[in-house]
Image (tube, rainbow, N blue to C red):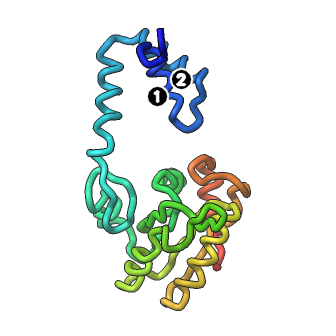
Amino acid sequence: MSQDLDPLRRVVAQLARFPGIGERTATRLAYWLLRQPPETAREIGEAVAGLPDAMVTCSVCCDIAATDPCRRCSDPRRSDEAICVVERPQDIAAIEQSGGFHGRYHVLHGAISPLDGVGPDDLRVRELVARIEAGGVVEVVVATDPDVEGDATALYLARLLKPLGVRVTRLAHGIAVGTELEYADRSSVARALENRREL
């Protein structure tokens, strides 16, 4: 039977498209699905299929959210004086779990990487500048990854934003160099936030 006609092989091939999921793990997941009641696979499939249409980009912070503006941008308890800039939407969760930041966020959707053809114009930098120019922001905390691309992005933002009259800080190295923020443990992120330094 060809792979095109084998439903199990099709599921394994689709699951293996997820980052960090190889064919072996995809096969294990597919067999797990077969052992579950039929409605489990149906519910998972419906949730995944509905995801693209259910999510929007927040017009304020550029996060991926179910509403526009997102719940964090709509929360009156958060401080408007500080904006934490991250590379990816999932990085916000790492900062939030630390419990050390109560301001607003801004998602760049990447980092400057000339080798990959990614420059400042490919990121959500214009939107960040517009937020600062609107007034009320005192500090921008740059929480890009502690790698070459993250450092280049942080330096670029510092040079761009300081003339706008805001304090620009960078997370301290409580996070190991080369670690993606979303995988850092809670206490390391909290320590990095607490010991952030001026750029």
**Which of the 4 image quarters holds residue 172?**
bottom right
Q: Does 12 sit above or below residue 151?
A: above
Seen at 59% across and 49% down, the residue is 186
Image quadrant containing the C terminus: bottom right
**Which of the 4 image quarters holds residue 178?**
bottom right
Seen at 56% across and 66% down, the residue is 118
Q: Position of residue 151 (x, y in %)?
A: 67, 69
> 94 or 146: which is nearer to us?
146
Marks 1 and 2, how far apart at CA: 8 Å
Seen at 47% across and 82% down, the residue is 138
Q: Position of residue 38 (x, y in %)?
A: 32, 13
The disc labelled 2 sits on which kind of residue? Answer: Ala
The disc labelled 1 sits on which kind of residue? Answer: Gln
**Direction right: furthest residue:** 177
Q: Secondary structure at mark 1?
A: helix
- Residue occupied by mark 2: 26
Q: Does 157 sit above or below residue 25?
A: below
Q: Are marks 1 and 2 in contact (CB under 8 Å)?
A: yes
Q: Position of residue 164 (x, y in %)?
A: 48, 89
Q: Secondary structure at mark 2?
A: helix
Let me know if residue 143 appears in the view.
no
Q: Does 43 sit above or below residue 143?
A: above
- Residue occupied by mark 1: 14
> 142 or 103: which is nearer to us?
142
Let me know if residue 86 appears in the view.
yes
Is 129 placed left or right of 155 in the picture? Answer: left
On residue 186, which mark appears? none
Number of residues whose C-alpha sits closer than 10 Å to that of mark 1, classed few (under 14), some (14–19) or many (20 or more):
few
